[in-house]
Structure formats: structure tokens, C-alpha cells
Amino acid sequence: MSAISISSEDNQISKELKKLMAKQTRVFLVHMNPSLGYRLFFHAKKAGMMSEGYAWIITDYLSNFLNSMDFVAHDLMEGVLGIRPYVSKSKELDSFQERWKRNMVLKKRTGLVRDLNIYGLWLYDTIHSLAIAAEMIGPVNSSLLYVNTSKNGTDNTNLKISAFGPRLLSELSRTKFPGLSGEFQLINGQLKPSAFEIFNVFGTGEKTVGFWTIDTGISRELISTGEPTHSTSTKNLKSVMWPGDSFTRPKGWAIPACFTIYLR
């Protein structure tokens, strides 16, 4: 494991990459924010680590922000595999994204306006679920909305909590609807696990090469066969272009150059 701080200077990132090059491992899992991720892949390409034989996998921490990164970033990351929550296409989602971009243009946002990512969609669906739960409770007496949390009941600076909180929570736990991000349902206070999309950074965009779900594991298509199978094999993925424009799956290790023995 290698840790690179968000405050790391460029020379520190290069130094850390050189340490990785000196090891046999050629498969790297990257979990970092977009800003640091961009810098990492810039220096990785400069060091020759985006060439054939290497494999890079990015988590959703970076994957969910790829739509806000420019073509230069995509070029640096070409051949990378990523995983992120899958959002199925729908007329409602397309309509929302159009309204979102039109609204951003009206607000005179500079630069290219892109689609709202999964975090924005989750936020929208969460607010929608709160509205549904509030409607289910119906009109309430405003004088009973809050209870004072102060021990002596006289400290007005203390926070107040809603007396209808438990009822709202109960309604939220029963709320289920098709949201923009997919089926919205809370299980034990957590959003119901969705499918994950496995994609390959290719050209100026990404290509979906498979999916992962808790029930079926890795699959090429997001179609339930009804069979109780669970696969962890990457052979179920579509064709992947790896770093260095290679379609040959990296073996995952290599003998570091500093340990190569030359015979005469």
C-alpha cells in the first residue's frame, strides 16, 4: 500500500511512483479525489507507467467525477478500469439533465456545463423522498414541531429537534420510488445497494465493459438469468483496452529493471 497526501508536491508524487516501479506489482488500485488523481496519472504517464504491462483500477471516489474532467485527463488515463454506481438511462433522467444544464446556462456559469453526477442525483432523490414522507404525515400543528433539548428549558441557544422526527423516519423507511439514480429504497437506514458499472477509459470517454451486483457478481450484461450463480471471473467482461493501447491482459507483475541480470 502506498499513501499520497492531497498536499503532496509533484516531486513527492514522482518519488512515490518510483518506489512502486521498483516493486514487482504492476496492478494498482487508486482511491483519491479528482484533483490528486489527475496529478497522479500525469506523473505516471511521464514515468512510463501507463504503458503495456501495467493495470490501473480507480474507485468511485474518482470515477464519479470523470464526466467533469477534460479530454486531457481522459488521454492521461486511457486504458484505466473504473467502477462506479450504475445509473440506468431513462426519459426522466434525460429531461432532468437538460433542465439542469439549461438552468446553469441561464445563471451564466462559465465553461462547459456537464451532467449532474451520481452524488447530485442521490441528493435530488433524497430531497424527493423527504417530500414524499412529509406528505404522508400530512398537516401538523406548528407549535408541536420542535422540542427543546436544553436541560433547564431556558437556554435558547441549544439546538431543537423535531417532535415528528420518529414519524418522519418511519415514513422514510417505507418510501420507495423510481428515482433519477435508480430505485430509491432505504434498508436499515442505508440506500439499497445498486449495480455497479465496470468501465474502461477509452479515447475521450468511457466504454462499459461489464457490471457487478451483490447477487450475480461480475457479468457482461445487467440481465438476471434467474440462476443462482455468482461469478468473480473477469473473463465475463467485454474486451478491455489496457494502458499502452494493448488488448492483452497484463499478467500483474514484472521483474523490476533494477533487478534485471544481463548475460553476455
Image: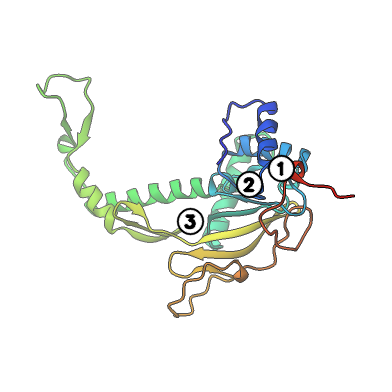
Q: Look at discs 1 and 3 and give the one toward the viewer.
A: 1
Residue 251: quarter of image: bottom right
Give the residue pinned by disc 2: 66
Q: Which mark is residue 138?
A: none
Residue 242 coordinates in the image, percent (x, y): 72, 57
Query: Which amino acid type is shown beneath numbered disc 3?
Result: Ser
Give the residue pinned by disc 1: 73
Q: Quadrant of the N terminus?
A: top right
Give the residue pinned by disc 3: 181
| N-terminal label among 1 and 2 | 2
Q: CA distance from mark 1 to mark 2?
A: 8 Å
The answer to which of 237 and 122 lies nearer the viewer is: 237
Q: Indicate the colouring scheme.
A: rainbow
Q: Are marks 1 and 2 in contact (CB under 8 Å)?
A: yes
Q: Crowding at label 1, few (<14), some or many (≥20) Cα neighbours within 10 Å?
A: some
The extreme right residue here reads 264
Residue 108 coordinates in the image, percent (x, y): 64, 34
Q: CA distance from mark 1 to mark 3?
A: 25 Å
Residue drawn at x 45%, y 49% as measured from the top left: 122
Q: Crowding at label 2, few (<14), some or many (≥20) Cα neighbours within 10 Å?
A: some
Query: Which amino acid type is shown beneath numbered disc 2?
Result: Leu
Q: Are marks 1 and 3 in contact (CB under 8 Å)?
A: no
| N-terminal label among 2 and 3 | 2
Residue drawn at x 38%, y 61% as measured from the top left: 177
Left or right: where does residue 90 sit relative to residue 77? left
The extreme left residue here reads 152
Query: Which amino acid type is shown beneath numbered disc 1?
Result: Ala
